[in-house]
Amino acid sequence: MKKLSKKILQAVSVSFALVALCPAAVEASAAKADQGIKMRLVNFKTCVEKSKLGKQEQASFESLKKQMETMLGEKEKTLNEMADKLNDPDYLDSLSPEAETELKRKFRTLSQEASQQQSQYYQAIQQANYKILDKLADVITQASETVAKKYGYHMVMNEEGAYYYDKELDISDDIVSVMDELFDKEAKEPKTSTGSNP
């Protein structure tokens, strides 16, 4: 019985010693980790506005928007002209009943087409925007990894995830430089066609 109580007493004292040392070990480990972590931040908007890829994607997006707005504008102009005719009693009096019915039918059809085109326009713009943002995010991620490995950073985050940070932690210009290098490299690579050549 004495042997058993002696062993229990030893186990309890070892347990107390471990419990007493654990918080100190955890605190020391956390302090060491805090000192060694190298983290930097990237401004997504800066990368989009300053990089060659971002500028190219913005230009193609604006071109697509302008093209679709032109198409919708032409349809809207035609609709407005038809609406003016339908609201002009003198013009309607000059038409035969069949011609008036035909004009109203064309107006309804054109209105439906314009509404469908507008819906398709918004969908296409939204899809193009998502695709562009996705592509830019992928390239920014790739550039961030390259810069992180080069300078030994443990983490590169989007600055939108931080409430506050020292502006010296912003490496957006480094990211833009790597993005431009990747853009130039891709531009020099020959394009492979998906079709078969006879």
Image (cartoon, helix red, strand yellow):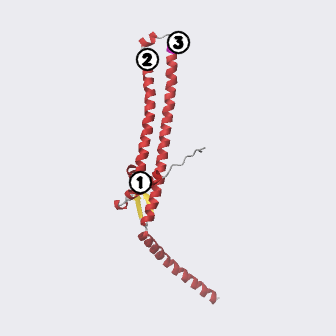
- Residue 139 in picture, x, y percent from top left: 46, 54
Q: Quadrant of residue 12?
A: bottom right
**Tag 1, which secondary structure?**
helix
Left or right relative to 127: residue 176:
left
**Tag 3, which secondary structure?**
helix
In the rendered structure, which disc, 2 or 3, sits on the residue that comes first in sequence? 2
**Tag 2, which secondary structure?**
helix
The count of marks equals 3
* Other residues around mark 3 within 10 Å, as few (<14) / some (14–19) / many (≥20): few
- Residue 116 in picture, x, y percent from top left: 51, 31
Residue bearing the label numbered 3: 98
**Residue type highlighted by circle 2:** Lys
Q: What is the span of residues highlighted in magenta in the rendered image?
A: 97-101
* Other residues around mark 2 within 10 Å, as few (<14) / some (14–19) / many (≥20): some
Residue 163 visible in the snapshot: no
Residue bearing the label numbered 1: 180
Q: Nearer the viewer, mark 3 or mark 1?
A: 1
Q: Nearer the viewer, residue 66 or 12?
A: 66
Quote the CA–CA distance across marks 2 and 3: 15 Å
* Residue at point 41%, 65% (across, down): 151
Above-or-below relation of 12 to 181: below
Above-or-below relation of 58 to 184: above
In the rendered structure, which disc, 3 or 1, sits on the residue that comes first in sequence? 3
Q: Nearer the viewer, residue 44 or 187?
A: 187
**Residue type highlighted by circle 3:** Glu
